[in-house]
Image (cartoon, rainbow, N blue to C red):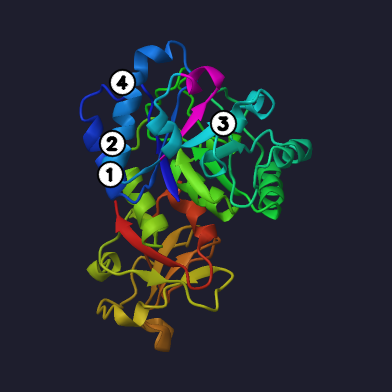
Amino acid sequence: MLGFSVYLDQSTSDNFREYVKDMKDSGFSEIYTTTCIPKLADHLTDLNYIYDLSKEFELHMTMKVDCHSYALIDNDILNDATLLIDDEALTNGLISHINNSNLAINASTITSEDLHDLKMQNVDLFGLNAWYNYYPHPNTGLDLTWLAQKNHWLHKHHMKTSGFVTGSKPFSDPLNEGLPTLERHRSLSPFIAAVELSKLETDNIIIGDSYSGPELRKSFKSFFVDGVIPLHMTNMKIGVPDCLFKMTFHNRKDPSRDVIRLAESHKMKCHHFDPTNNIERVFGSVTMDNINYGPYTGEVQIVCRHLPASQRVNVLGEIITSDLKLLSYIDAGTAFKIIPR
């Protein structure tokens, strides 16, 4: 599941409704906000508006609550939204007022002792939502290995996990440093961070920052809805076939060590197979075998490790630097598309 964050002071901005609609159209199904803010009473109208939009666009709503905010929020919202509780709510009685189906807990801090306490309060752990924090302060985000282990532990107890990635710049959080769960994702492309969280078996990916631009939304939709990794290509040479940008490709089911082999190469029906641009093949080079390769003529590959120049291989261009990490996620049979930039 994909989610995005909106904040109570954001709902008064221009085009807010249009933004929420765009996120829905891009495959997002969850909207997150927090009510743990000063002067919440001044923002209850904003909260009601966000809730109304979530109903209009059929988005599930999750909001972080504490004892103070819970007492101020309209019952219709409390009974419909998922309520993410803070650590104090595990012991201060708030949890007793929340239906199990509406409850979410803090994945970052939950312990075995907390799970025991939840069971003692008749909370059913099966399918319970566990949300990792986002971390505004640089250098305080979680470690990847630790999160992978915590995911495994939470899944062993039959819970679902959610994690945050940053949104589009410029960030609008108080420190302007982004709102990721993992520290390594603070400086990483939000899309690649989301793919990585998904590969770590995080069930739900949430954009923590308050804005996601059109290109980011397009990439999320391509991978999480259509199941296709988008790769952007640059430094294109003369003779690059147009059909390279019009098809969805798959890595062969018998994946090679050194290259990604486009299984659909034979369907491209290209006619420019003479040797040209026979230069070194760096990591991320997009290549085509020319007539010197005999029966392999016309095969297109993406290079995954440095390879020497060959008179049998034409270099067509390169995958952009910011997309190179995506190549490691293209396994046997993985679908992808190449987009000119």
* Label 4 neighbour load within 10 Å: few <14, some 14-19, many 20+: few
Sooner in the amino-acid sequence: mark 3 or mark 1:
1
Q: Amino acid at mark 2?
A: Leu
Residue, disc 1: 57
Residue 286's quadrant in the figure? bottom left
The verdict on residue 179 being magenta is no
Left/right placement of residue 326 relative to residue 52 reads right
* Mark 2 to mark 1 CA distance (whole Å): 6 Å
Q: Amino acid at mark 4?
A: Thr
From the viewer's side, name the closer residue of 209 and 16: 16
Residue numbers of the magenta segment: 61-71
* Label 1 neighbour load within 10 Å: few <14, some 14-19, many 20+: some
Circle 1: element type: loop
From the viewer's side, name the closer residue of 133 and 32: 32
Residue, disc 2: 53
Name the spot of residue 146 as percent of width and height, x first: 70, 42
Circle 3: element type: helix
Give yes or no for contact between labels 2 and 4 (Cβ–Cβ under 8 Å). Answer: no
**Mark in front: 2 vs 3:** 3
Residue, disc 3: 97
**Mark in front: 4 vs 1:** 4
Name the spot of residue 236 as percent of width and height, x first: 30, 57
Residue, disc 4: 45
From the viewer's side, name the closer residue of 173 and 38: 38
Sooner in the amino-acid sequence: mark 2 or mark 3:
2
Name the spot of residue 42 as percent of width and height, x first: 36, 12
